[in-house]
């Protein structure tokens, strides 16, 4: 007797589709979380590599390091090229992957899973100096600084994730005029600031990785700092 072969009924197909959709709904949040965690880990690793470059640079230049973005020529990410396997005057800094954070968003509206490929440097640099330990305002530096000036290098931030938003610049080249807005020297640049002013507004990412950002400190280690935990004291040179 011949066997009767039959296909799936419409109801059976719908059941299978529903099960697949349910599984996808269960798995996707976990996969998305894992992807973001991987991006955060890659960012930390990139900052650590920049830290190695900074340490090597300091050894070659009497323990001075680049600060800010107005008095340093060329800018810090250009000066570190030879220490990241690139020739200083012959390489394009835009090919250095560690200068970019994979989580840099297309806009400042929370789309932190779609990087903006036009942003070539995803970090802001410490350009903050203080007259004393009681000085809570400080001022911009704009010139190289000797590492011995920093009394607590392990607790002092050198680089941090750059905020993204309509008031923040996209740096497409080393000659961009907007580079001057990629340093930190006043309280309103910190992540808890609500200011979105082009000059004085928030410059450090409030929620790039979880509810905070990754940073590179001046003992050249990288770590995560929650936005609510970041203070002026973390940027002090005195």
Image (cartoon, helix red, strand yellow):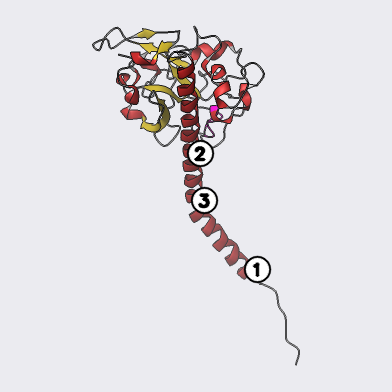
Magenta stretch mostly in which secondary structure?
Answer: loop
Q: Position of residue 227 (x, y in %)?
A: 36, 29
As measured in the structure, the alpha-carbon distance from the residue carrying label 3 to the one carrying label 2 is 16 Å
Q: Is residue 57 above or below residue 10?
A: above
User: Which residue, as the protein is rendered here, is positioned at the far bottom?
Assistant: 1
2 or 1: tag closer to the N-terminus? 1
Query: From which residue to which does the magenta span run?
Result: 99-106
* Count of numbered tags: 3
Q: Residues within 10 Å of mark 1 (few under 14, many from 20)?
A: few
Query: What SS does tag 3 mark?
Result: helix
Closer to the camera, 56 or 208?
56
Q: Position of residue 201 (x, y in %)?
A: 43, 16
Of circles 2 and 1, the one toward us is: 2
Residue to which mark 1 is pinned: 10
Q: Is residue 187 above or below residue 10?
A: above
Q: On residue 39, which mark appears? A: 2
Q: Residues within 10 Å of mark 2 (few under 14, many from 20)?
A: some
As measured in the structure, the alpha-carbon distance from the residue carrying label 2 to the one carrying label 1 is 42 Å
Query: What SS does tag 2 mark?
Result: helix
């Amino acid at each position: 007797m011949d066997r009767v072969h039959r296909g799936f009924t419409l109801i059976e197909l719908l059941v299978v589709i529903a099960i697949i959709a349910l599984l996808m709904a269960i798995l996707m949040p976990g996969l998305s979380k894992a992807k973001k965690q991987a991006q955060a880990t890659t960012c930390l690793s990139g900052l650590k590599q920049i830290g190695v470059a900074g340490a090597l640079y300091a050894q070659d230049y009497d323990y001075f390091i680049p600060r800010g973005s107005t008095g340093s020529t060329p800018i810090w990410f250009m000066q570190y090229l030879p220490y990241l396997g690139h020739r200083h005057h012959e390489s394009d800094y835009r090919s250095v992957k560690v200068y970019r954070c994979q989580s840099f968003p297309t806009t400042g509206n929370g789309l932190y899973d779609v990087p903006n490929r036009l942003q070539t440097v995803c970090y802001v640099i410490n350009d903050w100096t203080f007259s004393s330990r009681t000085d809570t305002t400080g001022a911009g530096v704009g010139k190289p600084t000797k590492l011995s000036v920093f009394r607590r290098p392990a607790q002092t931030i050198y680089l941090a994730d750059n905020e993204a938003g309509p008031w923040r610049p996209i740096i497409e080249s080393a000659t961009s005029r907007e580079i001057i807005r990629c340093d930190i020297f006043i309280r309103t640049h910190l992540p808890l600031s609500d200011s979105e002013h082009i000059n004085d507004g928030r410059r450090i990412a409030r929620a790039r990785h979880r509810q905070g950002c990754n940073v590179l400190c001046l003992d050249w280690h990288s770590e995560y700092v929650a936005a609510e935990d970041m203070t002026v004291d973390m940027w002090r040179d005195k």
